[in-house]
Image (tube, rainbow, N blue to C red):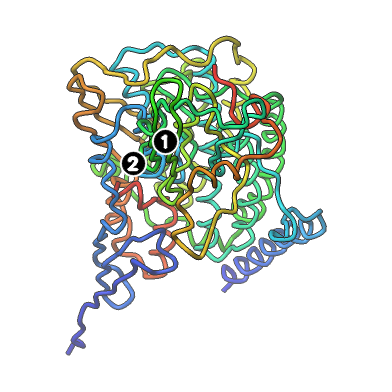
Amino acid sequence: MQGIIQWATQAVIGLVVGLRSTWRTLLEPKITVLYPLQRVNVSPRWHGLLALPIDPETGNDRCIICFQCERICPDRCIHIEAEGKGKERYLTRFDIEIDKCCYCGLCVEVCPTEAIVFVPHYETSTYNRARLLYSLSDLHQAAPKEPIARGVVGGVRG
Amino acid sequence: MALRTEELILNMGPQHPSTHGVLRLIVTLDGENITEVHPDIGYLHSSVEKMLEHRTFAQGIALTDRGMDYLTALANEEVYILAVERLAGIEVPERARYIRTILLELQRIASHLLWLGTFGIDLGAFTAFLWCMRERERVMDLFEAVTGGRLHHVYFRIGGVYEDLPEGWTDRVLEFCDYFLQRLPEYDELLTGNPIFKVRTQGVGVLPREVAIAMGASGPVGRASGVAYDVRKADPYEVYDRVEFDIPVYTEGDCYARYLVRMEEMRQSVRIIRQCIAQLPGGSIRARVPLSLRPPKGEVYVHTESPRGDLGIYMVSDGSEKPYRVKIRAPSFSNLYALTEMMRGWKVADVIAILGSVDIVLSDVDR
C-alpha cells in the first residue's frame, strides 16, 4: 500500500514537472506559420521547379542541345528533340515530365551553359495529371523574369 | 478441471496507426500475453538493389535517397558513395570529408528526434512529438540551405560533395548546437524523469546481450543490450578517427536503455559537429571524377553507422558504368527480427512500446 502511495506521489510530481515545461513553452513566441496566408522563405539552393531561363542578350534560352541532361536523368523524364544542323540547330521539343522528376538536380549539375536551373517555387500540385507535362514554353515561363545571378539559382560549381 | 482456452491470433497492421509504416505483426496471444510474434514484411518493397543495377554510378545516388531508409537519406548516400570510391580508388579532399561528417551527424540528430517524438506518441506523450518536430525543423532548414532538399538531398557526389557550404552556415550550425543543448533538458523533464514513462519502458522488452549478437542487432538497439559496437569507432570512415566522442553503452537491454542510448548519442553528435567545425579545413571540395565512371572489376563491402545501426553495402563491378550487383545490409531488418525475441511474454499494450523503441523504418527493412 505504501509503495502505491509513494509511486502515485512520484507520478503526480512527474506530471507537474512536465506540465511546467508545457506551460513555459505556451508563453514563448509561436513558431508555427499559417501556411496559405504566411509563407516560409526557401533557401536559394532549393530544389524546386525546373526552368529554362531566357537570356536577355539573345532573347532565347541558353540550351546548346547537348542532350547531357536527358542522358543523366535517372528517371528519364526529360525529352529533347532538335532540328537543323550545326549552329542552326534549334529546339523543337523540350519536355519535362515533372510527375516523374525526383528533383535530384543532376541535370542542373551537368548542364554546361546553366540553361536548366532550379527556381525556388514549390507549389506545383494540380488536379489534372496532364498539366504535369511541362513543355518548352512552360519552362520558359517558369523561369524568373529578371536575369539570374550566378550562384543564386544555378549554383556555383567547384 | 481447468478451463479450456484457445490461443488468439491478432493481426496488427499493415494499416494500424501505431505501427511505424506498413508493418504487419501477426501476434499469437494467450489471453493478453504474447506467445509469439511473426513480422510480415514486404509491403514497401521498392527493389532498390535491382534498380541500382540499371543506373550508372552517378545516377544511383538519387535512388539511394528514397529507395532505402527515407529518414536518413544522407547516411544512405554516404554508404553508397563510399562503396564506389573504394571500388574506384578515389581520394576525397579533406574539406569534403569534414562537410560529410557534419551533415551525417546532423542527420543522426534529425533521425533520433523524429524517433523520440514518435516514441513519445506511442506512449501517450504528445507534447514531446511537437517539440521534437520544432527542433527537427531547424535541422531541416540547415539541410535545405546546403543541399536544397529537406528529406532527399542528392548532395554527396563520388569524390566529394556537390557545392561548398553557403556563407555563414557553420555559424548557424553552432548556434543550433547551443540551442539544442539548451532544449534537451526539457525532454529530460518531460520523459526521462517521468514515472509513468519509466513504468512503461523500464524492464520492458529486454533483449539479452547474447540474443542481440545472435540476431545481428546493431546500432542503439545493440548498444542498449551491452554490445559496445559502433562502426564509427570499430571501422572509422570519413573523419571519425580524428574527433573525440564516446559511444553510450547500457547493459539493461530494455526500452528505457534504448531511449537513453539515443538521447546520449544526440549529445555526442553535437560534440562531433563542434569539433568538425573547429577543424574544418579550406580547399577543394570535389575530386576530379569522370561523369561516366567505370571502376575496375572487383567487389567491395563497406559499412557505416547509420542512425539505425550498421548499414552495409556490397557492390560488384564488372568494369562497366553500372554496378553488376548491389546488396544492402539494412540495420532495420536485423533489428526488426530481434523484436520476436523482445516481445515474447509481454502484454499487448507493450507491443507498441517495444516496437517504438526499436526505431525501424519499413522502407529500410524491405528495400
Q: Quadrant of residue B326?
A: top left
Task: Tell which residue pokes out farthest to the bottom in this image.
Answer: B1
Q: Is residue B73 above or below residue B352?
A: above
Locate residue B324, reporting x and y percent: 19, 29
**Which residue shows up at 35% across the image and 65% down it?**
B346
Q: Secondary structure at mark 2?
A: helix
Q: Can you identify the residue that label 2 sits on?
A: B331
B201 to the left or right of B87: right
The amino acid sitting under disc 2 is Pro
Taking depth in this image into account, of B110 and A6 the one nearest to the observer is B110
Please identify the quadrant where the N terminus of chain B is shown.
bottom left
Q: Chain of mark 2?
A: B
Locate residue A47, reporting x and y percent: 55, 39
The 10 Å Cα crowd at callout 2, few under 14, some 14 to 19, many 20 or more, is: many
Locate residue B307, reporting x and y percent: 45, 39
Task: Determine if residue B226 is in view.
Answer: no
Taking depth in this image into account, of A123 and B319 the one nearest to the observer is A123
Q: Chain of mark 1?
A: B
Q: Quadrant of residue B49?
A: top left
Q: Give the number of the disc on residue B306.
A: 1
**Which residue shows up at 61% across the image and 51% down it?**
B132
Taking depth in this image into account, of B64 and A86 the one nearest to the observer is A86
Labels 2 and 1 touching (C-beta < 8 A): yes
